[in-house]
Structures are given as C-alpha cells and as structure tokens.
Image (cartoon, rainbow, N blue to C red):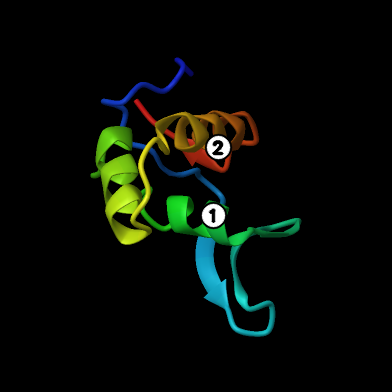
Amino acid sequence: MNAPTGDSSPRVGAGFRLQWEPAQNAHVLLYPEGMVKLNQSGGEIMKRCDGERTIADIVSELETAFSMQGLDKDVLAFIEMAGKQRWLAWD
C-alpha cells in the first residue's frame, strides 16, 4: 500500500467494523480476534474514513468541528499508523 496523501480516501479495512460502544464510552474497532478501543481523537478520525472523504476533507472537517488549525500532520500520522495496523485502507 502506498503512503497516504491529502488526496487519499481512507476507509475502514477489510475484516474491521467501527462502532460506538456505550459500555466503553468510546468508538471501537471490532475484528474476529478482538476489539481495539480508540481514544477520542482516533474515533473522530476513523468515523470520517468512509472511502469518500479525502484526508484533506477529513482534516478540514476536524479543524472546523474542534475550532483548531494545523491538524494535518497529526491526522496523517494517525492514518499512516492505522494503515500499518490494517485498520484503514486506501487506493
């Protein structure tokens, strides 16, 4: 898989399912062998990874939603890590 760029449109990887888990009070990634509990930032990024939005779109939405600027490096770093874990995929 190539490194993600601002034009990449990440989506949840095959075999994983993202959902809100009230008992955990967090977004979680479910997979056949278990579960990954995401922190708030990770959950906010992952729930926007629908295969339609580009990374640039995701960064823009997050910056607007949280009244912050300069999130591009943090978002890209999370997406790269999530890709290595196969939580996310992109073309």
- Relative to 88, say whether 34 is above or below: below
Inspect this view and state whether residue 44 appears.
yes
Point out residue 77 in the picture as x, y percentages from the top left corner.
54, 30
- Relative to 66, say whether 13 is above or below: above
Point out residue 24 in the picture as x, y percentages from the top left corner.
69, 77
Left or right relative to 11: residue 79: right
The residue most toward the top is 2
Q: Which mark is residue 4?
A: none
- Residue at 51% over, 61% down: 18
Most foreground residue, 33 or 56: 56
Q: Residues within 10 Å of mark 1 (few under 14, many from 20)?
A: few
Would you name the residue on which mark 2 appears? 78
Three-letter residue code for mark 1: Ser
Asked which secondary structure carries label 2, the reply is helix
Would you name the residue on which mark 1 appears? 41
- Residue at 62% over, 29% down: 84
Three-letter residue code for mark 2: Phe
Point out residue 48 in the picture as x, y percentages from the top left corner.
36, 53
Inspect this view and state whether residue 50 appears.
no
Point out residue 45 in the picture as x, y percentages from the top left corner.
45, 50
- Residue at 25% over, 41% down: 57
Q: Are marks 1 and 2 in contact (CB under 8 Å)?
A: yes
Q: Earlier in the sequence, mark 1 or mark 2?
A: 1
- Relative to 16, say whether 51 is above or below: above
- Residue at 42% over, 58% down: 47
Quadrant (top left/top right/bottom left/bottom right) for the C terminus = top left
Most foreground residue, 44 or 51: 44
Q: Residues within 10 Å of mark 2 (few under 14, many from 20)?
A: some
The residue most toward the right is 33
Asked which secondary structure carries label 1, the reply is helix
